[in-house]
Image (tube, rainbow, N blue to C red):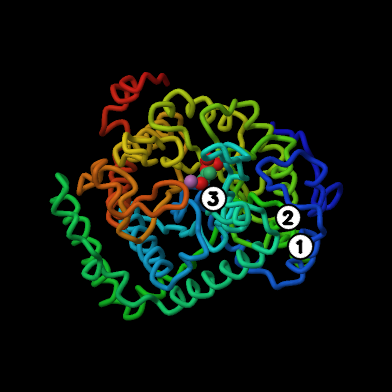
Amino acid sequence: MFRPLSVVRNEDDWSPQTWQQRPAQQQPQYAADGELAKATDRLARLPPLVTSLEVLKLKRALAEAQEGRRFLLHGGDCAESFVDCTSEIIANRLKVLLQMSIVLAHGLKQPVIRVGRFAGQYAKPRSSDEETRDGVSLPSFRGDIVNGADFDEASRRPDPNRMFEAYAHSALTLNFTRAMVDGGFGDIHHPEYWKLDWVEHSPRAIEYKRVVEEIADSLRFMKTVGGQFVDSRMHTGFYTSHEALLLPYEAALTRRVPQRGGWFNLSTHLPWIGMRTAALGGAHVELFRGIGNPIAVKVGPTTKPDELLRLIDVLNPYEEPGRLTLITRMGKSRIADALPGLLKAVRQAGRRVLWVADPMHGNTESVGNGYKTRRFDNIRGELDLAFDIHAAEGTRLGGVHLELTGEDVTECLGGARDLAEADLSRAYKTAVDPRLNYEQSLELSMLIVSASRATPSTRPIAPRLQAMGGSL
Ligand code: PEP
Ligand code: CO
């Protein structure tokens, strides 16, 4: 029988400021001139960006996903930037996410929870506090919410007032997104209006065309029997998410909601803790343990099963449904060794989590011409293995976490058009990590459907895992 190690109810020994007594990783060094306190005091008086009602609705949906009744599609930019807050970029990103969710809902035969990695994804963890170029060292770029990317002293100085800009750009993005989702986005549901010329370039073209025709048929059928039914069915909401990295900002947007019994981070629906800041006893875990949102934590290949169980104890001591999502980001070459032990430990401890796969962050590499990239085959390969390993362990992979854009960028290699290293320079635009482009994202959603259907009994799991050097 599970016994929580930490039984702290909201507010017993927690407030939105108790994180300050813990070691905080990945924070900028702001000048000690009082500007930070002024900025956070002002932010704390501004209205929240989301409501606790929406946040709890998402928590209920995630609880259903934990029970196998929904699938989570979580995707967007690695790092949003203020200059990319344009109608075209926001609309295209939303479109690709909605189209992917239709492919997934159709193929998986269950509702898809759509969570955008945007409207707040402005802070980035870095491997080093400083960057040195030609003998000059300056603070690293930590995302638009902290400093500027240009390599000069003024740009790189952390500026607390950038938090207002991040707040404002999040509000603008959210406002436009809500308007589009509420407006029904018209034709977007219908594959006739999708850009599908890439399908011809794939060896699986026949299968993809069949999927697209099936989707078109079922939408037509639903329309015939239900009139506006399709539109209203598709309006199952859209949620936002970001890495809640910059603690003074996240704490200022953490608000008390007495009628719902506690505190919520109202900067986003689903805040997550990144891999570099997930230490037990660290400031991020401290802030998160007191908020009522559903939360997610990234889990990497070096996480030990007992560490993970202690983290679950602290973040979800009362085993609340929908509360905790674990996003595994192992890398294709390490997942077969790293994932089974964690799944087993969590299952044997009887803990309830939503398992989600991030096939992006363990598969980043630099290629000859200096570009940071990811190979479509590795991304897809990690997802295939994640489905297999969950099936073998008797657990369920309930969602995916992807870095993508609705633009025609050339940042990840491969896919139906087989982007090569020489293509990367054509449209490499990301501020931090390489993203799947529009076509690669749609293609991946079709492959996710095939991977989830191909259980170990229909696809030989053992040879594939053995080929990876893994054991089950
Ligand atoms: C990210 O999601 O952009 C990120 C930094 O992830 P991770 O913490 O898994 O490295
Ligand atoms: Co990233």
Which badge, 2 or 1, comes first in the chain's sequence?
1
Q: Which of the labelled discs sits on residue 151, or is there none?
A: 3
Judged left or right of residue 281, residue 79 is: left
Image x and y of residue 204, in percent: 16, 46
Give the residue at mark 2. 248
Q: Which amino acid, mark 3?
A: Phe
Instruction: Kindly identify the residue that appears in the image at 75 percent across and 44 percent down.
Output: 286
| 119 lies above or below 371 | below
Q: Which residue is drawn at 39% across and 50% down?
A: 435
Q: Position of residue 260 (x, y in %)?
A: 74, 64
Tell me whether the residue at label 2 lies in contact with that at label 1, contact meaning CB atoms closer than 8 angstroms. yes
Report which quarter residue 8 is drawn in: top right
**385 relative to 460 in the view: left or right:** right
Q: Hey, what amino acid is under mark 2?
A: Pro
Q: How many circles with numbers are drawn on the protein?
A: 3
User: CB of residue at label 1: within 8 Å of ligand 1?
Assistant: no
Which label was assigned to residue 129?
none
Label 1 vs label 3, nearer the camera: 3
Horizontal side, residue 213 vs residue 295: left or right: left
- Secondary structure of the residue carrying tag 3 is loop
- Where disc 2 sits, the SS reads helix
Image quarter where the N terminus lies is top right
The answer to whether the residues at label 3 and label 2 have Cβ atoms under 8 Å apart is no
Residue 140, relative to residue 253: is it above or below? above
Of the 4 image quadrants, the one containing the C terminus is: top left
Q: What amino acid type is highlighted by mark number 1?
A: Thr
Question: Circle 1 sits on which residue?
Answer: 40
Mark 2 and ligand 1: say if the CB distance to the nearest ligand atom is below 8 Å: no
